[in-house]
Amino acid sequence: MAIAAVFAFASCEDFLDSENFSEANTNNYPASPDDLNKELAALYGVMNQFSTNPLQTPWFVNYIMSDDANGAGGTGDVESHAVAHLMTNKADLYDAAWHNTYVGIARANAIIGAVDAFDWTGNEKTRNQLLGEAYFMRGLFYLWGSQFWGDIPAYWQPAAPDPCPQVSAEEVIYPHILADFVSASNLMTHGSTTRGDGHATKAAAEGFLGRAYLFYEGFYKKMGEIAAANPAPVALPEQEGVTDPNLTKDQVANYLKDAIDNGGYSLVEDFRLLWQYTNPLTAPDYAFVKDLADQGKFWAGNGNSEEMFQVQYMNAGSWNGTIGMGFCNQVSLYCGLRCDADENSHANGDVETFPFGQGWGQGVINSNLWDEWPNNDPRKKATILNGPEEFNGNFFYTTSCSEETGYYNKKWMPVTAMSSTWSDHNNAYTWWGVWRAANTETEAPNGNSFQGDHFADIILLRLADVMLMHSEITGTNTEMNKVRKRAGLSDIPYSWANIKSERRFELAGEGLRFNDLRRWSGKDGGANCEAAQALQKQAGSRIYYTGFYEKQLKHGSTGWAQRYARTDGFLPKPPAQISYYSNEEILKQNPGWYDEQTDWNMPGTPTY
C-alpha cells in the first residue's frame, strides 16, 4: 500500500531542473499493468484507512445514527453520543471521513485514467475486470460521500480541478454513481475473481446499483413505494460500459435478478452461521448454537457464500503508525461489553459472559428494537444479545456506562472461547487470539488480544439484502420469502409495510437502517416524516446511566425529529474545508450545522 499510495501525490518535476529517478510519481507511475494492480490494492486499502476510527466509517456512523442503536459507551464518550444524536461536539468530527473519501476517489480516477496507457491485446478480460473494479470503487466512495454530505465537490478525471466546487448530488453526482455501477456490472464477468478475495465482483456491482438507485429515487425523487411508482429513466453520463444512456427501474430489477441467479452466491443455510459466534472454538460450548455444533456446522467464515462485498482485516493491527489499527476490525472492540466494573467491582467479558468479550460498550442496541421485534422470529436472539437474560444475572452495568441498555449487537461483538486465557486479556483472549496462539507464532497485535484480535469482515453487501431489494423494486414476494424461509418463517404477501419490516429485522445492526429510513421518507421530509418519527421514538427508551438507575433516553438538544428535519440526515462538511475557500459557490455548509441556532452542538454527554 505504501508503494501504491505514491500516485496520489503530484509530481514536482515542473518546479525542478532535474528528473526524479528514485521515487514514483504521476509522471513515471504506473509504468506497467502490474503497477495498476498495485494501485488497485491501494484503492481497496482506503477502506482500512477508514477503519482506523469506526466513528469515521459509513458503516458504524450510519448504524448509531439510526434507531437501531445508541451511541452509548462511557460518560466521557461525547463523540459517539454526538453522532447518535445528529449533533457534533467538535469542528473536526468528520475530517478523516472526508479525507478518506477523496483519497478513494482520487485513486479510482487515477486507475480509470491510466488503464489504456498500456497494450492489453490478448488480455482484454483482465483489463476490463480491473477497470470495472475501479469504476465500482469510485461509485462506492461517491455513494458514501453523497449520503454523508449531499452536494459535494466532484470530478471524474485523473486530476482534480482547483478549485473543485461542489455540485448537485441529485442532478450530477447520482447519475454518475449509477453509471459507475452500470459500467462495473457490464465490464466485469461472473466468476472472474475468487469469491471472498476482497475484490469487487459483477454481482456486487449489480447489488450496489440497486442500493444507489433505490436511495436516489426514494430520497431525491420522493417516489415512496418504488414498486408502485413509475419513475422516469435516469439519464446516465457517457462512459465505457454504459451501453444504454437511460437507466430504467426494470433494468435495475434485471441487474438485481442477475446477481441473485448468476452471481455464484447463495444464502448460508442457517442465519446464525453468518456470525462469528458459531466458530468451531466457541460453538460447542455456547448453548444458543450448540445444536449447530452437534451437527458439525460452524461459522461460514469470512468471504462466505452470502458475502458479496466486505471490508477485510488481517493480523497486523497496531496503535503505532498512521493506519495501524485499520488492519483489525475495531468495530468489534467498540461494540464489546463495556469493560469497566460495576459498583461491586464486577466486570463483563470473563467466563461469566461467555462467549462475548470486553470492549468499549458503544453502539448498544436501542431497547425499542428489542421490544418491537416479534419473539417468534429466530433472527431476534441471533442478532441481539440480551445480557441480563442470556448471562443469568451475570451481566454488569458499569459505573461509567451511559445510554447503556444491556442489549448488544451480536453481529459485530468480540467473541471468546472457553479455552481463552481469562486471567490475561492481553494474550489468547478472543477466539481469534486463541486460534492465533495455537496456529501461528505471531504475537498478539499490540501485545493485546482484547483490543487487537478482531478479524471478522465488515459485511457491506450480502445476498439477502439484494434479494430484499429485488422484492422491493418489483413488488413481488418470491425473493423476500426465500429470506424468510432461511430464518424458519412462513411466507407472507408483498406489501410496502412487509418489505420494510423484513429489511429492518434481517439487516438489523448492519448499518443500513438509517439510509433506508431516509429513502422511505424523501428529501425535505420534515419532523413528521417516517425517518424523523422513527428516530424520535428513541426518546424515553430504557437506558442505564453510571450503572445504577433505569432511566429514559433523552436527546442532547431539541430532539431527534427536529435535528433530522433541520439536516435531512446529512452530516456537517468539515468547517476547515469551508473556511479554506470562504466561498459558498465552491463549498457551502449543509443546513442545520454551525448556524445561529445551537441545537447542533453537544458540549458534553447528557446526564440523567
Image (cartoon, rainbow, N blue to C red):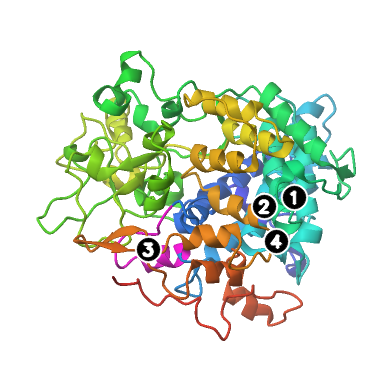
Q: Identify the residue at image location x=48%, y=43%.
A: 508
Q: CA distance from mark 3 to mark 2?
A: 33 Å
Q: Are marks 3 and 1 in contact (CB under 8 Å)?
A: no
Residue 426 in sight from this viewpoint: no
- Amino acid on which disc 3 is placed: Gly
Using the image as rendered, state which of residue 485 and residue 546 is in the foreground: 485
The region drawn magenta spans 69-84
Q: Mark 4 or mark 3, which is nearer to you?
A: 3
Q: Earlier in the sequence, mark 4 or mark 1?
A: 4
Mark 4 sits on what residue?
Answer: 10
Mark 1 sits on what residue?
Answer: 177
Q: Earlier in the sequence, mark 3 or mark 1?
A: 1
Q: Are marks 2 and 1 in contact (CB under 8 Å)?
A: yes
How would you rate the neighbour count of disc 4 (Cα within 10 Å): few for under 14, some for 14-19, many for 20 or more? Answer: few
How would you rate the neighbour count of disc 3 (Cα within 10 Å): few for under 14, some for 14-19, many for 20 or more? Answer: some
Q: Which mark is residue 143?
A: 2
Quadrant of res 137: top right
